[in-house]
Image (cartoon, rainbow, N blue to C red):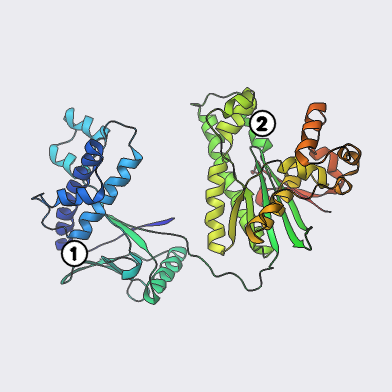
Amino acid sequence: MITIKLPYTSTDKFYLRLSDLRRQYSCVVRYAYNRYSEKNLKQKEIRSLCKKLNNINDLDSWLVQCAIMEANQLFNRFKNKTNIVFGGKLNFVNLCKDKITKDQYKEKRLLPINIQGEKLVHGNRKFKLNIIDENFIEFKMYRKEHYILHLPKLKKNYREILYKLQELNECGGYTYSIKLNKDFIFISFEEFKQELNSNRIENRFLAMDMNPDNIGISIIDYVNDRCQVVHTQQFNFEQIFDKILGLNLASSSLKFKYYQNKLNYEVIEVSKQISKLAKHFQCNYVFYESLKFNKNVSNKYNKLGNRKCRDLWKRNLFIQNLNKRLNIFGIKSHYINPAYSSFIGNLKYNYIDSINSSMEIGRRGFEIRVLKNKNSFYPAFTPNSLKHQWKEMASECRSWKELFQIIKNSKLRYRVPLEDVKEHLESVFSLNQNQKSMVLNYVFYD
């Protein structure tokens, strides 16, 4: 979701009208929220109750519906809390202490009107974009009551995005929502989907293996049921993890917050780099692990491992940002069940653990998601296809699960560390060639 915040100017008449609209809109939001909280009613029932309100004469049916939908969003967001204070607790405390007047508190309590988008009416029934020619947005309050909201000179990136949004709505419909208060207008819409590149390579995909302190990727051409490696790379977060864990900082310390923010920033930058790699190598698909942790996940790890997995692993932030960028490039992404992927990958391929695992995730994803071959969740169990040190042991087994149990019980190491494949290391560099970056890139060759 993209949201653009812009200042605007209009007439005095509009600001007076907007003040009345916001007051009535806020009244409906509070009323609907209380009905959700007290009786857990449905939208249709609340809509019928709102007709009995006698102080919302300026709101048409769509504005009332938008207010009810906003109340529903607030209820879902704060449903675990007994009540909320509209206008903010701090402002209410200041009112009780006579630090602000009652009129000032009422002003702070007003919500911006939030008009939801609709595809069938050129994106939004209450607003019309006219940015390309005149640089304004038209607010159509009623059929014969329109207001012009003048925008400032736009930055180049904002101008290009809003131009495209206007063009899409003139041709058909691309849903966007608008929030409006007395100072700013907020335009929200989903990222634009680009059409698939005709030059994209049909059977090429990017696969990922995600770990708390590293992400391994492999770009593969799947030809004749075999994986042909195009590119392999690992993004390593160990430096920043060592800083956070080694300093043993309290979660409230400024230094800990700095490193947490630094980690968030680096994760987003890595998602950008991976999306660019997928575009550069003309990948048709991206496959990644489906990682879901239950409440008892902490029982599987020691204190250090639990902190890495529960507190420092930014997997949701990474996936959300990556999917957003892949969506813009028009690249399809799929999540894959990662069962035994690390074990199988490390026994079959000659890279490091995360890359080996990503190659098995990619093979599995292409077979199941693209070729629709559900019987190929595991590759065929053929001992001769394994790396030489496992062939003799595998000859005594009939399946991957049986071999896994034997290796696990014998306590043999099957994960390949970085030190074991340094002869395959092509280059090491920091993220974006930035000396301040605490993420290392390892690029390998076959």
* Residue at the image position 17 percent from the left and 53 percent from the top: 19
Q: Which residue position holds label 1?
A: 11
Q: Position of residue 147 (x, y in %)?
A: 21, 67
Q: Which residue type carries mark 1?
A: Thr
Disc 1 to disc 2, C-alpha distance: 57 Å
Q: Quadrant of residue 38?
A: top left
Q: Crowding at label 1, few (<14), some or many (≥20) Cα neighbours within 10 Å?
A: few
Secondary structure, mark 1, is loop
Q: Position of residue 41 (x, y in %)?
A: 24, 43
Q: Position of residue 361 (x, y in %)?
A: 69, 49
Query: Which of 423/301 is in front?
Result: 301
Q: Which residue position holds label 2?
A: 242
Q: Position of residue 126 (x, y in %)?
A: 26, 65
* Residue at the image position 54 percent from the left and 43 percent from the top: 316
Query: 89 left or right of 23?
Result: right
| Identity of the residue furthest to the left in this view | 54
Total labels: the figure holds 2
Q: Which residue type carries mark 2?
A: Asp
